[in-house]
Image: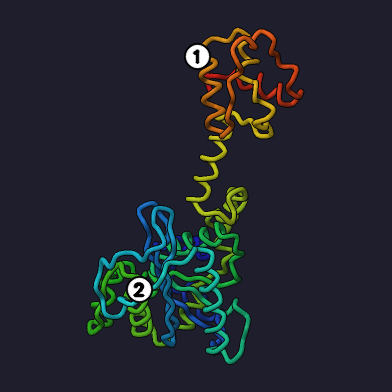
Amino acid sequence: MSLRLGFDYCMAHVSESLVKEEFQSVKNNTSKTTIVFYDFQLTKDGQIERLAAITESGEKFSANLKTAPTSDKPPPARKKYSLASYIFTQHPMSPSLAIERFTTWIKDRHRVNAEGDEDVSNVVLAAHYGSCHHHVYLLRLMSNCDITPPPYRICDTLAIFKMLKGLAVEVTLPALVVRYTAWLRHVYHDPDSDVNALRAVMTAAFPDVRRVCLAFSCSYEFFAKATGLDRYESAIAGFRKRGPLQNSCLRRRSLEETREPRIDGIDAGDVSDLEGAMATLDLSPSVMDSFLRICNKTGISLKKAPAGTHPSCNLTNLTNSNEYKVMELITRPASV
């Protein structure tokens, strides 16, 4: 956990002197720093369906995201919570739109809180157990949406509690709420409630929360290299700007195109005597039926040649390109 955040030692070997060095390296003036606590809710297959965030000063962000197995309807209200019930009335948006609004909201909040500063590298994204969970999923979602991650700094509040309060302290979010903010109503695993509780716990446990989060943070670029997410971009290059459901439809469509032969370009007039002409090829009834089914699928209507004209019909009336397509079709009856 600590190695992903830029430390040279694991969590069990982080010494007190190392912690002091980290604090001394941070500037005393943190007025230009904005802390954003965020959390999300995942589906069973690891897709983000709800995203919530709150700044240190109390501004909130919340969004529903469309996922592959869901429709354009809001998710069912599985939990009734006074502070988060309004989220279920929102219409779900695409992941790319949600991330764009999230980054725009962060930029606007930072500009307001930091007296006009537009350098988003002074923004610290904080999440509980974020180094092994939240930051990984958020970076991956940005890459899937073809969005370059802004130069934020990230920190893990769980790692901060372990390094500053000791390894023996229970650091789960419900336990921290009971210890530091017992008056706060908290619904575990609800993103809006979790970010509200995390903000209250951090401000109660650490009076100078900005300096603490800034001291134990790292850049997004370093975190991506430490976790291997910098190579994830090239792996999804062919699936950009498309969601999992659209990619599945495209794969299924391409598979159907390879399985089913096409006779695009053959007009009904060109094949008016095609059935009679094919009779001269002495085809078996099964092959003939297969070819007729193909024609029916593609919407081409064939007229049967009059009786007695079959021997005189041949394929010379067809163009060369159409003749090639016809021969290709009748030689692949098994693909129907």
Pointer 2 or 1: first along the chain: 2
Crowding at dot 1, Cα within 10 Å, few <14 / some 14-19 / many 20+, comes out as few
Residue drawn where x is 60% and y is 76% of the image: 121
- Say which amino acid is labelled 1: Ser
Judged left or right of residue 267, residue 142 is: left
Residue 297: % across, % down: 53, 32
Q: Position of residue 140 (x, y in %)?
A: 52, 58
Q: Name the residue located 50 percent from the left edge and 61 percent from the top edge.
A: 4
Is 222 placed above or below 295 here? below
Tell me if residue 1 can be seen. Answer: no
Residue 89, label in figure: 2
The picture places residue 325, in percent across and down from the top left corner, at: 67, 24
Q: Quadrant of residue 294?
A: top right
Residue that mark 1 sits on: 286
Residue at x 59% of width, y 78% of height: 120
Q: Amino acid at mark 2?
A: Thr
Q: From the viewer's perspective, is 201 left or right of 238?
A: left
Gap between marks 2 and 1, in whole Å?
58 Å
**Does dot 2 land on a helix, a strand or a loop?**
helix
Task: Answer above or below: position of 327 versus 29.
Answer: above
User: Does residue 105 sit above or below 296 in this rendering?
Assistant: below
